[in-house]
Image: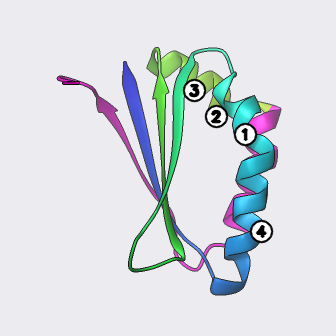
């Protein structure tokens, strides 16, 4: 399982638009082949900072999504609101406890 974490910082005036975009896109992203889970977090002290966590069966599945028209459309609209360059990490999940 690959976990993709993306940290995004938005201009204050772009926060609401991003949240609407995510709301309208989340089901398509979550049901893209290989995506097992999708989460969105907002920083408690900085309401313009968000993190997405997406869980993929493999790097190949993530790359298929990143090369898709869906990603191109969503990412173009998302990054238009950035106040800073996004940061991203791809991680292997080693342990999970419930």
Residue 67 in sight from this viewpoint: no
Is the Cβ of the residue at disc 2 closer than 8 Å to that at disc 1? yes
Q: Which residue is drawn at 54% across and 76% down?
A: 48
Q: Which residue is drawn at 64% across and 34% down?
A: 66
Q: Does the magenta stretch include residue 85?
A: yes
Q: Earlier in the sequence, mark 3 or mark 4?
A: 4
Among the 4 quarters of the image, the one containing residue 25: top right
Read off the residue under disc 1. 71
Percent of width and height locating residue 72: 77, 43
Q: Does the magenta stretch include residue 35?
A: no
Read off the residue under disc 3. 63
Percent of width and height locating residue 56: 48, 22
Q: Which residue is drawn at 38% across and 25% down?
A: 2
Read off the residue under disc 2. 66
Is the Cβ of the residue at disc 2 closer than 8 Å to that at disc 3? yes
Read off the residue under disc 4. 17
């Amino acid at each position: 399982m690959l976990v993709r974490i993306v940290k995004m910082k938005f201009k204050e005036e772009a926060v609401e638009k991003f949240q609407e975009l995510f709301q309208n896109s989340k089901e398509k992203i979550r049901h893209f082949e290989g995506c097992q889970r999708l989460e969105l977090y907002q920083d408690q002290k900085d309401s313009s900072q968000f993190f997405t966590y997406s869980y993929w069966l493999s790097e190949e599945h993530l790359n298929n999504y990143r090369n898709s028209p869906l990603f191109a459309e969503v990412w173009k609209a998302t990054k238009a609101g950035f106040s800073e360059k996004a940061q991203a990490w791809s991680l292997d999940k080693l342990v999970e406890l419930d």
